[in-house]
Image: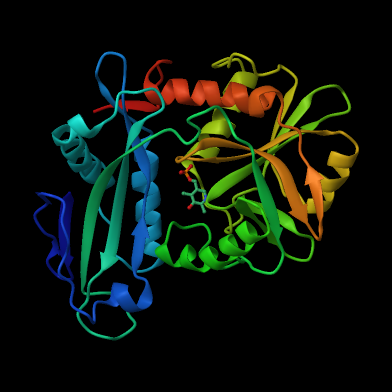
């Protein structure tokens, strides 16, 4: 693991790469009381030539600094941290699985370690990075998930912290997740306001594909309004769809008649479109699953059925997934994939 200590006044100390193991923390450490903790998640792949690749890590470094700033943890030089992460991954490269769909998960984290009970910016902090090999999310083909349209809990609110990857955003989601599981659903579909705007699914960004009246498609995701986590996968889906439309980088399998929208979507719109046969598919997007198709949404006591296409994934999601995974693993050469 990689550790880098920080102290007010002195700044960042010497980075160290050492064997994975427990930390000794003072019981009054602020992270243990006030959730002064942020994290990131990315994956390293080994390509067909044996080269190690990380997907758009600059985005994760930027987002981690944005998160740090939001909870008054120290910010850092993202390019310098990325170089240290590359050193760590190179050293541990024998842990990167080479089977298709497998990767090495990279978890950077930053915690406040001030040794005094008191709510304020910490005078000490610790940045650390740990790694773990991970298998494919869907080892036996895509398995669409059922979502519970959650109206009794909220994940984020205007002016809140939903747009940042802070530890404090995740513990409160566990009970609602258990509630959804008891009702037979895999994940919470987080809704906002009396209109029940769709925000996110579990810890993924949400996409809806509508059939348009002119025989084309509209790919919709909610806008970054301060409640939505700005996912790297979300941005990648939007960017590759837009670059396909301008013919900058055509994506195999994506239709030419496609509108890409960042706009609010309500459950009412989804329900009406589903009943009118105008939903093509819905899917979550995030680093862990990449793309996660949805086949059903429990909403106010009834189930809304969502088409999933052949093999568990609809036509737009399949084209996007194939292109994304190709770029991540190096099978499709692209500047987003950084060779370590
Ligand atoms: C991490 C995360 C995502 C996905 O972000 P990626 O950068 O694509 O992995 C989406 N929503 C939430 C709440 C998250 O924590």
- Position of 37 with respect to 163 (left or right) is left
Please state the horizontal and vertical placement of residue 51, each as a whole percent of the image: 25, 20
Please state the horizontal and vertical placement of residue 302, each as a whole percent of the image: 83, 54
| Residue 56 appears in the rendering | yes
Q: Quadrant of the image for the C terminus?
A: top left
Which residue is painted at 61% across and 55% down in the image? 225
| Residue 155 appears in the rendering | no
Please state the horizontal and vertical placement of residue 244, each as a whole percent of the image: 60, 19
The correct choice, above or below, for 287 with respect to 110 in the image is above
Question: Residue 84's image quarter?
Answer: top left
Which residue is painted at 24% across and 50% down in the image? 129
- Position of 315 with respect to 280 (left or right) is left
Give the residue furthest to the bottom. 117
Which residue is painted at 18% across and 30% down in the image? 94
The correct choice, above or below, for 163 with respect to 107 in the image is below
How is the structure coloured here?
rainbow
The correct choice, above or below, for 14 with respect to 104 in the image is below
- Position of 55 with respect to 203 (left or right) is left
Q: How many marks?
A: 0
Question: Residue 191's image quarter?
Answer: bottom right
Please state the horizontal and vertical placement of residue 15, each as a whole percent of the image: 12, 52
The correct choice, above or below, for 206 with respect to 24 in the image is above
């Amino acid at each position: 693991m990689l550790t880098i200590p920080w102290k007010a006044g002195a700044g960042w100390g010497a980075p160290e790469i050492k064997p994975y193991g427990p930390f000794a923390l003072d019981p009054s450490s602020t992270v243990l009381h006030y959730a002064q903790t942020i994290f990131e998640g990315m994956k390293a792949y080994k390509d067909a030539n044996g080269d190690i690749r990380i997907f758009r890590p600059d985005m994760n470094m930027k987002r981690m600094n944005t998160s740090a700033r939001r909870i008054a943890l120290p910010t850092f030089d993202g390019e310098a941290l990325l170089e240290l992460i590359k050193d760590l991954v190179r050293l541990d490269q024998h842990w990167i699985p080479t089977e298709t769909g497998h990767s090495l998960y990279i978890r950077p984290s930053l915690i406040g370690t001030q040794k005094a009970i008191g709510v304020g910016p910490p005078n000490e902090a610790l940045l650390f990075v740990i790694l773990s090999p991970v298998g494919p999310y869907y080892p036996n083909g895509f398995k669409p998930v059922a979502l519970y349209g959650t109206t009794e809990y909220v994940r984020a609110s205007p002016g809140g912290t939903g747009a940042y990857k802070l530890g404090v955003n995740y513990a409160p989601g566990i009970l609602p997740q258990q509630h959804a599981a008891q009702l037979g659903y895999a994940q919470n579909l987080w809704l906002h306001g009396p209109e029940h705007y769709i925000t996110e699914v579990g810890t993924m960004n949400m996409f809806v594909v509508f059939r348009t009246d002119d025989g084309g498609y509209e790919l919709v995701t909610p806008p970054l309004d301060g409640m939505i986590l700005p996912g790297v996968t979300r941005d990648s889906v939007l960017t590759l769809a837009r670059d396909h439309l301008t013919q900058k980088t055509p994506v195999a399998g994506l239709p030419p008649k496609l509108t890409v929208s960042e706009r609010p979507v309500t459950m009412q719109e989804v329900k009406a479109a589903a009943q009118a046969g105008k939903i093509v598919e819905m899917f979550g997007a995030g680093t862990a699953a990449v793309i996660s198709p949805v086949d059903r949404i429990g909403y106010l006591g009834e189930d809304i059925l969502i088409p999933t296409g052949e093999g568990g994934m609809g036509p737009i999601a399949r084209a996007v997934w194939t292109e994304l995974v190709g770029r991540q693993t190096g099978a499709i050469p692209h500047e987003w994939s950084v060779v370590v």
